Amino acid sequence: MVFTTFTPSTLAKYDGNKDPRVLLAVKGKVFDVTNGKAFYGPGGPYENFAGHDASRGLAKNSFDPEMITPIDQPIDKLEDLDREEVQSLDQWYTHFENKYPVCGELVNVSEKDK
């Protein structure tokens, strides 16, 4: 697996529909969650996170579509999270880190061009 730099728009195609791989980002790292496609792929309980930065939704334990930053917007800096939400996000990050391979990093379009 090649480590790749993704932007929100290049990550979006990896939602399990357009491409068989399912990827999502947490805290700037992109995880290949294809082995968990039943959870993260089409029809799964976490499908709205596939192809996106899942950080805010995981921090807030919310599947609300408003938790997902639109792909044409800068990456959410998560500066307004409270201590419990940061702890929740850190726990989710550890879960992904222990279970799924990191296949890249998520950056804003302007950062990728550097």
Image (cartoon, rainbow, N blue to C red):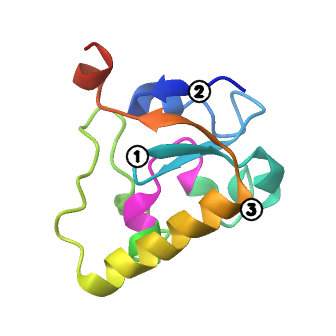
Using the rendered image of the protein, determine whether residue 62 is visible from the camera's viewpoint.
Answer: no
Query: Disc 1 versus disc 3: distance between alpha carbons?
Result: 21 Å
Q: Nearer the viewer, residue 43 or 33?
A: 33
Q: Give the number of the mark in front: 1 or 3.
A: 1
Residue 55 part of the magenta-drawn span? yes
Residue at horizontal 78 percent and vertical 52 percent from the top: 37
Badge 2 amino acid: Phe
Q: Which is in the foreground here, disc 3 or disc 2?
A: 2
- Looking at the rendered structure, the secondary structure element under dot 2 is loop
Inter-mark Cα distance, 1 to 2: 13 Å
Mark number, residue 39: 3
Q: Position of residue 99 (x, y in %)?
A: 72, 60
Q: Residue at x 24, y 38 (%)?
A: 74
Q: In the image, 41: left or right of 58? A: right
| Label 3 SS | helix
* Residue drawn at 69 percent across, 46 percent down: 101
Amino acid type at circle 1 is Gly
Image disc number at residue 28: 1
Q: Which residues are magenta?
A: 49-57
Horizontal and vertical percent for residue 2?
Answer: 66, 23
Residue 55 falls in image quadrant? bottom left
Residue 62 percent across, percent down from the top left: 45, 74
Badge 1 crowding class, 10 Å Cα cut-off, few under 14, some 14 to 19, many 20 or more, is some
Q: Residue at x 46, y 28 (%)?
A: 6
For the N terminus, the image quarter is top right
